[in-house]
Image: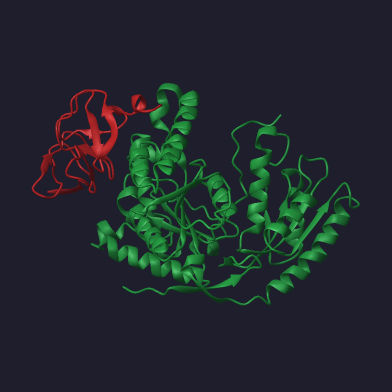
Chain colours: A red, B green
Amino acid sequence: MKKGIRLNPKDNVGVVIQEVVPGDEVDFDNGLVVKALDSIRVPHKMAVKDIKTGDYVIKYGEIMGYATKDIPAGSHVHDHNCDSEKLMK
Amino acid sequence: MAHATTFMGYYRPDGRVGIRNYVIAVGNCSCANGLINQIAARVPGVVPMIHTDGCSTPRENERWRETLVGVCCNPNIYAAIIVGVGCETDDAKEIGKRVEKESGGKPVYAAVVQQDGGGAKVIEACVKAAEKFVADAAKCERKEAPISKLVLATECGGSDALSGVTANPAIGYVSDWIVSNGGTSILSEIPELFGTEEILAARSVTPEVGQKVKNLIYEWQERTRYLLGENTGRTLARGNMEGGLTTIQEKALGCVHKGGTSTVMDVIDYSERVGDRKGLIIMDGPGYDTDNVTGCFASGAQLFMFSTGRGNPLGYPVAPVIKICSNSKTYYAVGGDDGDMDINAGAIITDGLKPEELGEQCIEYLLDVCNGKQTRPEINGYGGAMCVWSTSSPF
């Protein structure tokens, strides 16, 4: 079992603190265990829930961006599937 | 844990208290930097402050003038040598008079190449003045001062996705402690607050201050939009993204932890003097650390707490910068205990250290630094130039 950190119960992403390869189970505490679909470096983000295109990506309990494509739980979340341009003035 | 409520510092004529006791030589513009280097090389104990701009940029003159005066008036500075060339926009001798007046009579010597016999004569005169200033500075003694005399500035540079998890909350813990003891803490780097405007406005002392915070963040967003268009959400450095940060909002939601949980008391311009303001203050300024630290120093900050996840080594020539690393891997990769970093916040993850234990350690470390302990950037000599913020290009 690998370790991750989910900072807020509202968050749909967590930070991995051990290198993750597909198939690894990652423990984000409080019983939340997610199976990795991608290789994820420390300290990059993993989706801990399914996130649909256009849904907000939540970290620290706040909006950090939105999904630019469907992101299944266990995926690496980064600039290939998450942006924030439309949130800006 | 009970911490000391005082530190030992250098009282200045205006009542402010320095935690360092420097004599500086500073150019009124970058054309004077060759002379500044020679003066500093001739007089051990003089710190050269290398001005990165200073002339031929009409929209910047007022900000640069306030910054230069503010840097010289900072209580970490015992005395200042100011060198002008003569043809630049501002008059170095007028700047010197302003420093004397605003600082309540700090020792200042100003000379101008085109008025005072050329470069060689100006260097000789400045060396003579500097030798006296250094000898006088050595007679200054530290005296007890309350924590309320401290102005802390918080910075982050080379952030990664753990900066907001480990290091920035520790800085916020220290910031809250300074505020609760009647001191002042500056939060800045406005592009690194994008997306936190509602959080900060809700924490502001009045709706008017909250609106000022929002307006400042929106103004920067519009400037960013103008420059970056559809890439405006990626106001990040390459290293930030390699470190796992995806959007500027994600970075900002981590950065805002540097301000702890205190009430936002006011918003000030870049390098505007903090004056009598206490509590958490937001200063206008860019996320680029070298420019931002100069603004905070000119505003009156005597010291910095600076988080990094990638291992940014930056210090400041005349202020202690406490480097706090977000992760153990980087901490050891840049030299470990005798390297570039002061504190390893990554111990929260790798060694099971509790966040509040780290916060308490940081307060004790900061008190030691106020009393004279050298930070890693001071020991390593990693203070850079006196970079000043510009929003326009020179003519």
Rendered view: B320 above or below A49: below
Residue B319: x and y, percent?
56, 60
The N terminus of chain B - image quarter: bottom left
The answer to whether residue B332 of the structure is visible from this angle is no
For the view shown, which residue lies furthest in the right direction? B117
**Image position of B62 (left or right of B312):** right
Of B268 and A5, nearer the camera is: B268
Q: Quadrant of residue B193?
A: top left
Q: Residue at 63% across / 48% down in the picture? A: B67
**Image position of B68 (left or right of B210):** right
Residue A85: x and y, percent?
36, 26
**Image position of B365 (left or right of B371):** left
Labels in figure, total: 0
Rendered view: B86 above or below B341: above
Rendered view: B216 above or below B106: above
Residue B302: x and y, percent?
54, 61
Residue B48: x and y, percent?
68, 56
The C terminus of chain B - image quarter: top right
Of B299 and B166, nearer the camera is: B299
Q: Quadrant of residue B218?
A: top left
**Image position of B81 (left or right of A34):** right
The answer to whether residue B244 of the structure is visible from this angle is yes
Q: Residue at 13% across / 42% down in the picture? A: A24
